[in-house]
Image (cartoon, grey):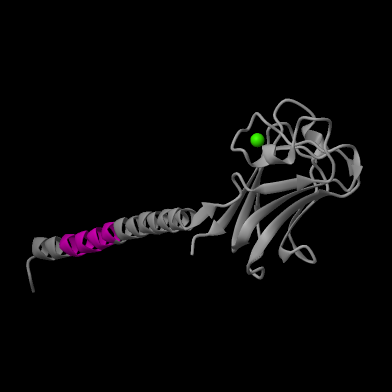
Amino acid sequence: MPPKNDHVRKMAKCSMKFATRNITTAILNRHSDILKEIHEAVRKDQNIAQLREVAYGKQTRQSSDHGDKYHASASVDGNLDTINHTGLDESPYLEVDLGNEFQIKRIDIFNRKNCCGERFHDVDITIGPSHNQMYLCAHYKGASRNGEHLVFECSHNIKYARYVRITIKGREYLHVAEVKVYAIND
Ligand SMILES: [Ca+2]
């Protein structure tokens, strides 16, 4: 029979092994969590990198002009201080013609900063390859606020679109500071 203190030493060694293993497992789990976070961050970065903005400077039109200022083109001039502005129309709309078909992934709308952001409500954002083939990308109930940045993801089922149309359902003015359309960079 081994001396008693030998037995105690073995027990101590054994529990040390378990403790080390537990610590190692904890460290690996923590590293695995960190790796997951890194992978997720890289994936998001790649998604953003694969998108490009395709609305800037493109042709635009709106349901009506509010006076001689606030043309539809101000919605794609890259300046958050300039706005388009329709008259008080029944279902006012703003349309961007992208010139070519793009696989649209995301549409960002920046509301007007200085006034009346709540007029942006009950909005349909439709996209399509032609005017008689428009599909709903997103619906926004609102109401929005001054200067709000709204982000809409388009459905994966919609393949290619040339036109982006923003319509308020009801009698309202439609004005926004900027519309940005992000398409897959293929
Ligand atoms: Ca603008």
Q: Position of residue 71 (x, y in %)?
A: 74, 36
Q: Quadrant of residue 159?
A: bottom right
Query: Can residue 110 be spotted in the picture?
Result: no
Query: Residue at 16% across / 62% down in the picture?
Result: 13
Q: Is residue 95 above or below residue 186?
A: above
- How many labels sit on residues? 0
Query: Residue at 56% across / 58% down in the picture?
Result: 183
Q: Quadrant of residue 142?
A: top right
Range covered by the magenta-colored residues = 11-24
Query: Residue at 60% across / 44% down in the picture?
Result: 57
Q: Position of residue 7 (x, y in %)?
A: 13, 66
Query: Residue at 68% across / 54% down in the picture?
Result: 97
Q: Nearer the viewer, residue 182 or 68?
A: 68
Q: Position of residue 43 (x, y in %)?
A: 44, 59
Q: Nearer the viewer, residue 138 or 3?
A: 138
Q: Quadrant of residue 70?
A: top right
The N terminus, quarter of image:
bottom left
Q: Nearer the viewer, residue 186 or 144?
A: 186
Q: Is residue 89 above or below residue 163?
A: above
Instruction: Return the residue found at the far bottom.
Output: 1
Q: Position of residue 81 (x, y in %)?
A: 65, 28
Q: Is residue 108 above or below residue 98?
A: above
Relative horizontal placement of residue 1, taking residue 87 as reference (left or right): left
* Picture quadrant of ligand 1: top right
In magenta stretch: residue 84:
no
Is most of the magenta stretch helix, strand or loop? helix
Q: Nearer the viewer, residue 8 or 170?
A: 170
Q: Is residue 70 above or below residue 138?
A: above
Query: Can residue 80 be spotted in the picture?
Result: yes
In magenta stretch: residue 15:
yes
